[in-house]
Every structure is written in structure tokens, then in C-alpha cells.
Amino acid sequence: MDSPPLRIDRADVRQTDDELTLILGTAGVNVVLIRLRYDGWVDEVINSAGTVAPGPGAWTLIGHALSLELGTRAAATLGFPRDCRLHLDVDDDAIRQVRAALLEILQCACFVVDTPEGRITS
């Protein structure tokens, strides 16, 4: 049985010389971080407990629905379902920020994403 999508009400992007991180949270708590470490170009997912696992093999952002397809081991490590679904309850500016960050962080993963110009896939 599919679990309902996690509701996200905050999206922030942080960039340093070493990494780019998309922070998705709700009610003041970071729920999931998606990070690109520039040293080795490694993408990672981090849960609210700070546990780190490899990034998703594929992702989809359609409207306000984000899906991350995690590997079996990564999902178990993070305590997330393999098809980690999130509902981004944020404004259109935040969706644009999330889309841009995901395209940069997860550039090696397969994706489907809506843009103002239309839907694009990798």
C-alpha cells in the first residue's frame, strides 16, 4: 500500500564552496536534504536524523509533487519508502528554486520535470 506524500512547507537552497544543498522541511523541521558534494560530484540524501545515503537514481517534479526513486539500501538506511513522495506546499518561486537545485544536484539521475516551457526528461 502506498503511503501518502510527505507534506513539505519550506524549501531552502544553501551553497558553499564545497556543496550545494536543497533543504525540504515542514513545521520548522528539516525532513529531507538533497546534497551535491563538489569533491567527487557525489549526490546524497539526508534524513531528519542526519543519516546519509546515496542520492536517487531517478526523480520527478510535476507541479508540486516531487518523487525520489531511492535504491533499496538507501531507502532502508534513511527509513524512507523506495518511492519517496513529497507534496511541496510552497509558492511558485520556491518551486522554481527547487527545480533549479534538483537539476544541478541530481544532474546524473534520470528525471521528468515540468518547466514553464513544458515537460522535459533526461
Image: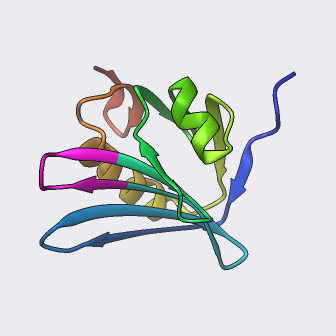
- Residue 13, percent from left and from top: 36, 68
Relative to 81, 92 lies left or right? left
Of residue 61 and residue 51, the one placed in the foreground of this image is 51
> Does residue 22 lie above or below 12 as drawn?
above
Of residue 28 and residue 40, the one placed in the foreground of this image is 40
Q: Residue at x 37, y 59 (%)?
A: 97
Q: Is residue 33 magenta?
A: no
The magenta stretch spans which residues?
35-43
Total numbered labels placed on residues in the image: 0
In the picture, which quadrant includes the C terminus?
Answer: top left
Q: Residue at x 57, y 25 (%)?
A: 72
Determine the residue located farthest toward the bottom in the rendered image: 28
Q: Residue at x 63, y 28 (%)?
A: 83
- Residue 80, percent from left and from top: 67, 41
| Residue 69 seen | no
| Residue 44 seen | yes
- Residue 48, percent from left and from top: 61, 64
- Residue 22, percent from left and from top: 40, 60
Q: Residue at x 48, y 30 (%)?
A: 60
Q: Is residue 40 magenta?
A: yes
Determine the residue located farthest toward the right in the rendered image: 1
